[in-house]
Amino acid sequence: MPTTSPPGTAAGSPATDNMTGTSTPGVVMIATNTHKTSSKCLALPEQLPYPTNMIPLDAPIMPPRGSKKRTAMEMGNSSPAGADDDDDLDPSEQAAIEKRMRNTISARKSRARKAAKLELLEHEVNKLAAERDQLQRQCEGMKMDLILAHRRIAELSAHAAHAAAASSAAAVAGKVSGVATPATPAVVPPPLLGMPGGALPSQPF
């Protein structure tokens, strides 16, 4: 079916976004922001790949509804008499067609830009959500380590206080009786249950 190709782009040829000034073989890049962009996200790259599920920039543009070409295409007649001849168009009609072509290309770029931004942001959200879950698991492990450490400190403090009280009582009793009290041997506190040797558990990071 005869259709109209965008200005400066041949149908079927690799498309290039003229706003970027660059092209990647096999991948069309589109500028993330334009001079009309109201709010710009500095975290986004300057260029984004053109979404593959969007209409390509070099896709043929359908003629306007009601035109001879559009009517002939809808009726299945690919070459009606005079339908494919643009030489008989006056300057105003030709200007209107060119304006419509520019507007169509601009609309395609705008929709593709929004879709590319959304796709990138969704990917970043999923990535950050996975990192958040991992950090939450690490935080829970650190909290458990802290609880065990506090329990261990409380046990050691209680054991030291008990030993000090026993030693003091023995010293007082020795002074009263006049008998020298032998030095109280250092008592090693038992390790916390589930922690061999009293070592604090380590949380891998």
Image: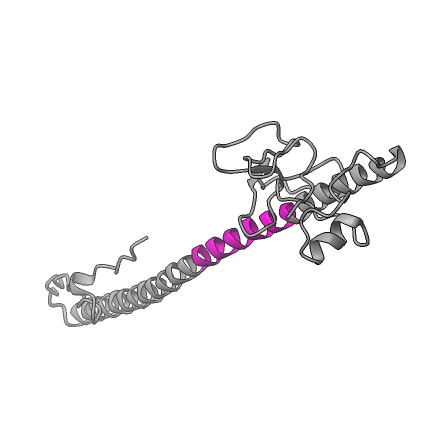
Vertical order, 135 against 57 (above or below): below
Residue 152, magenta (yes or no)? no
Name the quadrant containing residue 6: top right
Q: Which percent across, then down, holds residue 127? A: 46, 53
In the rendered image, residue 123 lying in the magenta stretch gets the answer yes
Which percent across, then down, holds residue 70?
A: 75, 52
Residue occupying the far top of the picture: 21
In-image side of 201 versus 99 (left or right): left
| Towards the viewer: 79 or 145 | 79
188 vs 61, left or right, is left
Q: Is residue 194 left or right of residue 7?
A: left
Question: What x and y, as percent, mark residue 120?
Answer: 54, 49
Q: Nearer the viewer, residue 35 or 30?
A: 30
Q: Position of residue 44 (x, y in %)?
A: 58, 41
Point out the stretch of residues depicted in magenta.
112-132
The overriding secondary structure of the stretch rendered in magenta is helix
Occupied quadrant, residue 17:
top right
Along the viewing direction, whichever of 98 and 160 lies nearer the viewer: 98
Residue that appears at 28% across and 65% down: 152
